[in-house]
């Protein structure tokens, strides 16, 4: 990963060169039809994912078990989203941190139990990923930090 620049990384994730016609649509389609929620996150935002992997996941992985490093990367991503929200709102807002912590925990459970979607069922995959995003967002609303 370190030898790849972010444009090559993004092209590998989306299947199209950065800035090419149809790239956003292709990226959304590939993310929402991914075979797992973990794969969804690998595809979702290639630029952000590149830097999260470079500056958060890889350094954590060198010191911690892979599963903990992955979960802490989700938590750190949530904290970053909350920091931006707080900066804009000029008020404390901790919605994203518990939401991303829940999504990270689900990704780990999915890996642990080998959960994967059947290939060739794009509508089912879209429903699965959308449902997980909504369900974890609703659940995170019950968490108070």
Image: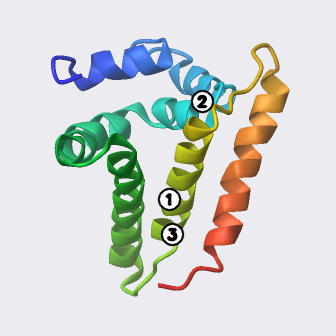
User: Which residue sits at x=64%, y=76%?
Assistant: 141
In this rendering, is residue 62 above or below 39? below
Numbered disc 2: secondary structure: helix
Give the residue number, with chain letter if any, for mark 3: 98
Nearer to us: label 1 or label 2: 1
Q: Are marks 1 and 3 in contact (CB under 8 Å)?
A: yes
Q: In the visual, does 130 lie left or right of 64?
A: right
Q: In the visual, does 79 lie left or right of 108?
A: left
In this rendering, is residue 73 above or below 24? below
Numbered disc 1: secondary structure: helix
Label located before the other in sequence (1 or 2): 2
In this rendering, is residue 136 above or below 65? below
Estimate the spatial distance between the alpha carbons at disc 1 and disc 3, rounded to whole Å.
Answer: 6 Å
Residue 89, quarter of picture: bottom left
Q: Pinpoint residue 143: horizontal percent, then vertical percent.
A: 58, 80
Numbered disc 3: secondary structure: helix
Most foreground residue, 84 or 30: 30
Estimate the spatial distance between the alpha carbons at disc 1 and disc 2, rounded to whole Å.
Answer: 17 Å
Residue 47, quarter of picture: top left
Q: Pinpoint residue 7: horizontal percent, then vertical percent.
A: 29, 20
Q: In the visual, does 27 lie left or right of 122?
A: left
User: Which residue sits at x=64%, y=38%?
Assistant: 113
User: Which residue sits at x=57%, y=34%?
Assistant: 40
The quadrant of the picture occupied by the N terminus is top left
Label located before the other in sequence (2 or 3): 2
Estimate the spatial distance between the alpha carbons at disc 2 and disc 3, rounded to whole Å.
Answer: 22 Å
Give the residue number, with chain letter if any, for mark 1: 100
Disc on res. 31: 2
């Amino acid at each position: 990963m370190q030898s790849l620049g972010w444009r090559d990384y993004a092209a590998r994730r989306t299947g199209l060169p950065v800035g090419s016609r149809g790239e956003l649509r292709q990226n959304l389609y590939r993310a929402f039809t991914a075979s797992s929620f973990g794969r969804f996150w690998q595809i979702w935002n290639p630029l952000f994912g590149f830097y999260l992997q470079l500056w958060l996941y890889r350094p954590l992985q060198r010191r911690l078990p892979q599963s903990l490093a992955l979960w802490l990367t989700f938590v750190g991503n949530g904290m970053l989203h909350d920091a931006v929200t707080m900066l804009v709102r000029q008020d404390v807002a901790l919605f994203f941190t518990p939401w991303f912590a829940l999504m990270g925990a689900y990704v780990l459970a999915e890996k642990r139990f080998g959960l994967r979607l059947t290939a060739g069922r794009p509508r089912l995959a879209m429903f699965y990923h959308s449902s997980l995003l909504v369900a974890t967002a609703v659940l995170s609303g019950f968490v108070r930090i």
